Every structure is written in structure tokens, then in C-alpha cells.
Amino acid sequence: MKKLDPAGPPERISPRCLRIPLPDPFVPGVTSVFVLDSEAGLPPWLLDSGADMPESEAALRAGLESLSITPETASGVVLSHTHLDHAGGLLRWRPESLLAHQNAVEEMRNLQPASSRGRTALRSMGVPAELADDLAPEDEPVGGAPFARTPVSHPVSGPDGPIPGSGGWRWILAEGHAPGHLMVFHPEDRVLLVADQFLHRWKTPIRIADREEDSFGLFLASLDRALQLEPHIVCSSHTGAIQPAIPFLADRRAVLDRQLERTLAAVENGSSSAWEVVASGGDRRPSGGLLILYLRERLAMLRHLAADGALVRQLQDGVERFVPA
Ligand SMILES: [Zn+2]
């Protein structure tokens, strides 16, 4: 599969969907705005708004110019989630309409959203203090205060619904990565735009900011929901289109089920924190941002196993520790 090029031309994903790749300050350096064809006579909707940087806005305007529209004259923006590489454009220009899930709107109004990779998060994973200082990132792709006043013309709630005037496109709630994360689906073309939910060859960063949320369980439910839709094509915002989609999704499900089993086995063998589970995994321990990604996933899995009753959680000094039930 080709790597997605942030300087690449617009790419046709399906008869009713075009992707405009854009530069992005966060790994892997590329994000996307998808153009969703609407009913005859109506301008298209956009999925997401790009990153909050001039290069991203310029690339979006150039891509839309070939379609004779601008970010302002599109029917509106469907916001997949509030992270700055998807919502940042909203800080630079004002769409005609903005459709976002109620859970995402609450996150937008939250002046101090909790981090899933900052020092507190690393502490709860049991990362040793000296390593946590090195690992904690400077930049956060988390929104919050900047969006406190962004008008949302179409707040939506529940598990799914239509995108108005779009000729059949639907939004589907897919939690686990960010509050109110949406996927977008067209039932005739069977194209599923998954934003950050399922990334080819990358792990989706699981949200761990809320200790009481079973984000891994929510993520698994969204994977099952995606499988139920029987999509032909799955396309994320940061990686190339995946076709056929069902074997890819089924494989993701099987891999995660195996990792859950291994996580449970690690606790039965004496590991008690996310850090200890990752450290017990043998000699191939990742470093930097990839290590945080693994730790987040393990902590989310441990919480999920606790929510299921297989493990019991104990809080010790800010560290979440787990023992067999
Ligand atoms: Zn994201």
C-alpha cells in the first residue's frame, strides 16, 4: 500500500467521495479532509477541517478550488472529533454548518480536557518517574479551550443518523479514541470513512483520560459496528484506503482479542500495571511515542478486563494496579 502524501493531489475514494490530503504537525505528518457529494444542487459536505496551520489551510483551499468551492461555501463540516489535526481548520475559517456529536461538543466546551499521554496519564500506567519526564510530550493534539465558542449548528446525539441534504451519507458514533468520535458511511457505495478509528499498520491511540470510562470496550463495540455495516472500503484520515475492508476489520478484532488474553495472562503471572505488562512482553520494547501508544492500549485493556469482572483495580499512589478477581 502507498503511503499517504501530504502534498499529493485529491484522490477519488468512491463515486461520491474525494479525499484531499493535507500536511499535519502530528505523527504521521498527514491528515485528510473528505469531500462528500450531496444531493443534486447542494454543495458537498466536508468530513473534518484539517490542521490548525497555514500549510494545511492552503492545501485544503487549493484542493477545493478544483471543485469550485471553498471551506466556507461547502454545505458544512462533519467533525469526526475534536483533536487539532481534524478540528484545527475551525480555528481558521467558519463553515456554513457544523455537525458534531453531543459528546464531542461537550469536549469542545471543556476548558481543560484531560490528556491521555501527559504526566498524570503516564503515572497511572506505572511508568517510572524519571522515564515519565522524558516521555511526556510537549504538544497535545487535544482540543478544548480553543473551541469553547465555536458554534455547532447541528449537534447530534445517539448511535447514528443522516447527514442532512447529503444524498444518503450517515454519521455513526464510534467511541474509544476521542469523545463523540464519528465515522461516516454511505450505504450504497459501502464506503466507511473511519477518521482515527482504524488506522492501517498503526494502532489507534485509545483514550485513557477518564479513569472510569471503559474506552477499550467502546472501541471494540465500534469495531463490531463497522463489521456489521459490511463496508467495501475503509478509509482513515492518516492512511491509504483499505479494500477489501472486512478481512482487515476482522483481523483487527482477532488481534485485539489475542492481546486481551495475553494481558490477562500477564496479570495472572504477576504484572500489575500497564508498564509491567508492556515490560513483561519480552525484549522488543518500543520507545518514545510508540511506547506511549502501547501503554495506553494496555491500560485501556486492563480497565476493560476490570469492567468485565476478570480483574480488580487498586489505586496506589496514582498508579492503577490490577490483580486477578
Ligand atoms: Zn485523533
Image (cartoon, rainbow, N blue to C red):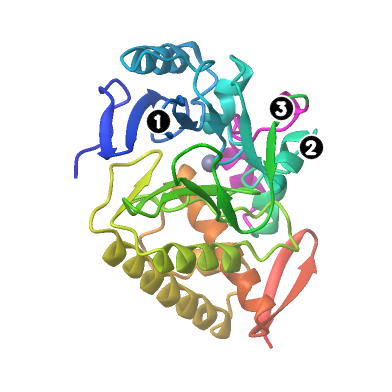
* Residue positioned 34% across, 59% down in the render: 231
Q: Verify CB contact (< 8 Å) between mark 2 and mark 3.
A: no
* Residue positioned 65% across, 70% down in the render: 303
Point out the stretch of residues depicted in magenta: 127-148
Label 3 amino acid? Phe
In front here: 262 or 286?
262
In front here: 16 or 279?
16
Disc number lying in front (2 or 1): 1
Q: Is residue 12 left or right of residue 306?
A: left
Label 1 amino acid? Ala
Q: Residues within 10 Å of mark 2 (few under 14, many from 20)?
A: some
In front here: 116 or 3?
3
Where in the figure is residue 66, as x and y percent of width and height? 31, 14
What residue does disc 2 label?
110
In front here: 145 or 117?
145
Q: Is residue 96 left or right of residue 51?
A: right
Secondary structure type for disc 2: loop
Where in the figure is residue 2, as x and y percent of width and height? 19, 39
What residue does disc 3 label?
147
